[in-house]
């Protein structure tokens, strides 16, 4: 069994690290949020007081952080991963961040003699808890292969994507499609209701027809249809509007860098921005349905 250092014990990282504990690994975890640390400790993660304490002597280090700026600080800052870990330690970043930051981390790790992979995930909090996430892993072939062995207890799918930053590229494109599908599910669901269709009957049709999507099956924005949906719990977050806005903006930035028009993606980003501007950034991203059905106040519909 391996010694694992884990940085970032939030909604995703807390469950992911717990699955490594269940697999028999020793996991030392660090997070700035005391509540996240306490929750992880209850699941068997050993809390530590610094990044250095988490990574010293580790066979592998996982990071699961909100943004590129956080990942750069954790890896490149004083007392960070690259200043504290042994060069034999495999480094795995499962954050969803911009390609530029991912490339900077790859470059810095290589210059320091480390093996590093970008390995973002898809599957949400439910997938993190169940150990069924899809990992998209980019980097040198030997590092990707070795990372897969550590990732296995957390994953339903482990997909090598190619060289450095291709994991992040895959995640950005995947999430772009997810959020467009979510917006489509919201509009279709509201229209079906106003045309007099029973909400469960319509979902039963769409979920086995050409309107199907992961968002429809898992995040359906109408309450009382899909048990896993945040709409059943007043949009308590499974994936916040703030994070959705961050992720789709990553896609838009990458599109601009490559000269790729994203007319639909840019419109969906505006929906998330309206939730953020309305002070709802901590609510679930599927709350965009309320921009369709008119529930939200008029000032959010500018």
Image (cartoon, grey):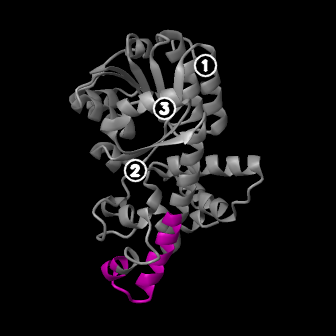
Across and down, in percent, residue 288 comes to 50, 63
Position above or below: 54 against 97: above
Q: Tell me which secondary structure the magenta stretch mostly adopts.
A: helix
Residue at horizontal 48%, vertical 23%? 91
38 sits to left or right of 52? left
Q: Is residue 298 visible?
A: yes
- Say whether residue 193 is magenta: yes
State which tag comes first along the sequence, 2 or 1.
1
Across and down, in percent, residue 23 comes to 24, 31
Q: CA distance from mark 3 to mark 1?
A: 14 Å
Give the residue at mark 1: 110
The span shown in magenta is 181-204
Mark in the foreground, 3 or 2: 3
Give the position of the N terminus as an image quadrant.
top left
Q: CA distance from mark 2 to mark 1?
A: 29 Å
Contact, CB < 8 Å: mark 3 with mark 2? no
Give the residue at mark 2: 123
Across and down, in percent, residue 57 comes to 38, 10
168 sits to left or right of 201? right
Give the residue at mark 3: 144
Observer-nearest of 294 and 1: 1
């Amino acid at each position: 069994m391996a010694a694992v250092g884990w940085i970032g014990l939030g909604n995703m990282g807390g469950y992911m690290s717990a699955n490594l504990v269940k697999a028999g690994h020793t996991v030392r975890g660090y997070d700035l949020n005391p509540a996240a640390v306490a929750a992880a400790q209850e699941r068997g993660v050993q809390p530590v007081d610094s990044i250095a304490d988490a990574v010293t002597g580790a066979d592998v280090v996982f990071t699961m952080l909100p943004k590129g700026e956080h990942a750069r600080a954790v890896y490149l800052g004083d007392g960070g991963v690259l200043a504290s870990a042994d060069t034999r330690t495999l480094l795995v970043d499962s954050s969803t961040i911009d390609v530029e930051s991912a490339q900077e981390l790859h470059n810095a790790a290589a210059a320091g003699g480390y093996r590093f992979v970008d390995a973002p995930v898809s599957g949400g909090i439910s997938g993190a808890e169940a150990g069924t996430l899809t990992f998209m892993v980019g980097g040198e072939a030997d590092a990707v292969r070795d990372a897969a062995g550590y990732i296995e207890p957390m994953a339903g799918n482990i997909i090598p994507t190619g060289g450095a930053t291709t994991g992040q590229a895959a995640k950005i494109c995947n999430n772009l499609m997810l959020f467009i599908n979510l917006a489509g599910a919201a509009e279709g669901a509201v229209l079906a209701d106003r045309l007099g269709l029973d909400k469960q009957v319509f979902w039963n049709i769409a979920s086995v027809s050409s309107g199907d999507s992961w968002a429809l099956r898992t995040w359906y924005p109408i309450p009382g249809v899909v048990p896993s949906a945040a709409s059943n719990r007043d949009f308590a977050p499974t994936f916040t509007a703030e994070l959705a806005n961050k992720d789709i903006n990553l896609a838009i930035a990458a599109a601009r860098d490559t000269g790729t028009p994203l007319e639909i993606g840019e419109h969906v980003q505006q929906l998330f921005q309206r939730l953020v501007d309305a002070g709802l950034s901590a609510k679930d991203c599927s709350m965009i349905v309320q921009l369709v059905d008119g529930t939200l106040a008029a000032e959010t519909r500018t």
